[in-house]
Image (cartoon, rainbow, N blue to C red):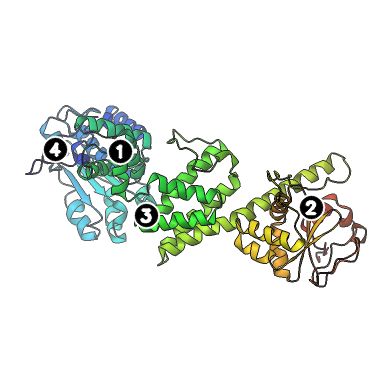
Amino acid sequence: MASLPVMKSPEGYLVLARKHRPADFGGVLGQPQAAGLLQNAVAQKRVAHAYLFTGPRGVGKTTVARILAKALNCAKGPTPEPCGECPSCVEIAASASLDVLEMDAASHTGVDNIREVIIDTVRLLPNRDRRKIFIIDEAHMLSQAAFNALLKTLEEPPPHVVFILATTEASKIPATIGSRCQRLRFKPISPESLAQCLSDVARKESLKAEPEALAVIARAAEGSLRDALGILDQARSFCDGPVSAGGVREMLGYLGREMLEGLASALLRRDGKALALALQAIYEDGAEPAQALRELRSLMEDIYLRKIGAKFGDTLPISDPPGVEIRMVSPNFLAFILRKLNAALAELRLGDSPRLVLDLALFGALEGGLDVENWVSRLEALEKGWGARKQGSGDAPAIVPPAPTPDPQPPASLDEAGLLARLVAAVAQDKASLAHAIEKAELRENGEGYRLVFSRIFDLEQAKRSQDAIAERLSALLGRPVSLTIEQGAQDGSRKAEGGKRETENIPPPPAASSLPSPAANDPAMKEAMRVFGGRLKVTKKSS
């Protein structure tokens, strides 16, 4: 990558971002479309009178504007390949040309600045070169009055003038200005291209750097070459010796790899105790909650893309977090976690307690993730049941959760009270609030399985939402598959004869299909939905 000849500071040191700035279109990194279009325009003598360069920070907008100015005013041009040696090229590279005027709109926003720099000088012929070129950086910062003053000049400029407006926020450029410019979009530079560029710069600077360290810098730069070179410059001073991945992570305030994977492992295993310990270690290390959320989101995004088989470019390889097999994690649970992390990052900008936001997000993911998976499983089972009906197989098959793997050594026979206590302890490992609700119920055995009887409607509804998970835990405790029903009734400890009347003072049982209003009563889909979710079917007629 060719570099611009620039003047050094009195101390003789020049930051990498300036020292290795591209000198021609061929050296521009990651912007082949913009560079190619401008080269062709110069070669074919079809240069527009105004351009609007849009894109994120540090991707080359101002650099390309200066290269275009050199291409137009080079002593050997106009040429798509400026020499870089003539007085015009050297002065433009050093931002010292009288015919190429640069204006920072972030600090010169008013109409007086536009009048002084542009309007009062635009009609004057170039001092020496062919074109008078105005480069306005961060153009979206101009005031409305400044835009209005610029509009007439931009609409009918003299033939020797070229305007180049650069902005990171194209949406803030008035349509009247944007419509009079030829727009070029600059894209974020990929981490792979940044890492390769950093490797080339390190080699030219005789700087030893680990490939993993350069990869960490490339990802931290978020598509900005200027930021990447700035971080490498900082790391060279920070690290005592070669630039290492650990040193870069420490400099940037990143979590340690073990700490990050421990946090992800606890979250994916839904281990509340391990998650609390991981968060405590993060706080003791002094890491920022926002940084922890961003790193965890990045790792979870990589896991999610691996899980669904989607690849967008060459992502950095990651291994399974300790104690977790990625193939055993549900994509729905991963998507739920990502949404939680995104919401938490948005909330951090508004709240005054970052730690509380982080705690609520992660422990909330533990609580809600299981409910999400249970609902998805039930809906998938319902869909399969409807499919069987459509194929003429008669009544839809019963939806039975998959039989859990029995414990290697089933516990000795327990009475109902002891078995309930074991069940509460087992459920508490996944969801403490659910275990608290089950603790208030009575467990009763019948001929075909077990029943959980609740006196409070709130506890009953909470248990119904996790019925499959409770049944799985109960089966694991007994070492054999068992069925489980959840109902409301009096908790007097008495057993009811099989087939006896169920106590349903507050929640009536689902009505028989024959008593439902016709024709909805005979609809297979409605029958199956009621069998899975319970409740009554109420038919209302829309008034005409």
Residue 248 in percent (x, y) is at 29, 44
* Residue located beneath label 2 in the image: 483
Quarter of the rendering occupied by the N terminus: top left
Residue 168 in percent (x, y) is at 34, 49
Disc with the residue nearer the chain's start (4 vs 2) = 4
Any mark on residue 6, and which? 4
Q: Nearer the viewer, mark 1 or mark 2?
A: 2
Q: Nearer the viewer, mark 1 or mark 4?
A: 4
Any mark on residue 48, and which? 1
Q: Nearer the viewer, residue 343 or 212?
A: 212
Going by the image, does 270 lie left or right of 345?
right
* Residue located beneath label 3 in the image: 172
Asked whether disc 4 touches disc 3, contact meaning CB atoms under 8 Å apart, the reply is no
Any mark on residue 309, and which? none
Q: What residue type is disc 2 on?
A: Ser
Q: Residue at x 23, y 45 (%)?
A: 135
